[in-house]
Image (cartoon, rainbow, N blue to C red):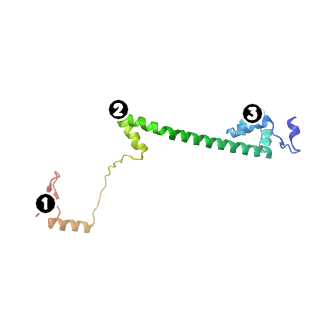
Amino acid sequence: MSEENNQSPVNEVKVLLPRHKALMRLLVRGWKLTDAATELGYSLSRASVISNSSVFVDARERLESEVDEKVVESMIEVKDDLKRTAADAVKVLKTELKSSKEHIRISAAKDILDRAGIVKEEKMNLNALVEPSEAFISMLARAMKEGKVGKTGTDGSQETTT
């Protein structure tokens, strides 16, 4: 059966031939229509007619759905496999905590803490000018006068006023 015999009068494909299915597989894999057409020996216009036919669109949607399901199944299998091997990985890290080499112990400890969600706090150095209000200055002067607040010397020592 030739390609022309399975088309409607407007050139629409009625039955998918093996070459049409090959075009579909390439498109589902992410190929551009122009590249897939060239690869299979179709003109771009013919490949466009084929890929836009209702039988092709329906079959492509089914194939994409099957591919999506297989990808999801594979991802679930990988995730389950990782869960099964996670316990072994923890055992390895625990063993590394007893290493005679300090850098290995530190690395293992960091990895364990990181995976447990415990992160190192980062300190920030901030240079800021704080201008106290007049009310604060008055209150501080009164407290110093009453001897409730000590004066700090230039060397950092504390003097208490009495």
Task: Using a 10 Å C-alpha cutoff, classify the residue at mark 2 as few (fewer than 14 neighbours), some (14 to 19) or many (20 or more).
Answer: some
Numbered disc 2: secondary structure: loop
Residue topped by disc 1: 160
Q: Residue at x 33, y 31 (%)?
A: 101
Mark 3 and mark 2 lie on one chain; the one further toward the N terminus is 3
Q: Nearer the viewer, mark 2 or mark 1?
A: 2
**Residue 128 tag number:** none
Q: Quadrant of the C terminus?
A: bottom left
- Whether the residues at callouts 3 and 1 have beta carbons within 8 Å, the answer is no
- Is 110 on the left or on the right of 22, as rendered? left
Which residue matches tag 2?
99
Other residues around mark 3 within 10 Å, as few (<14) / some (14–19) / many (≥20): few
| Residue in view at x 62 percent, y 42 percent | 73
Closer to the camera in the image, 112 or 10: 112
Q: CA distance from mark 2 to mark 1?
A: 53 Å
From the image, tell me which residue sits under label 3. 38
Apparent side of residue 85 relative to residue 11 in the rendered image (left or right): left
Residue type for callout 3: Thr
Label 1 sits on what residue type? Answer: Thr
Q: Going by the picture, which residue comes out furthest to the left?
A: 162
At which x and y percent is residue 2?
A: 87, 35
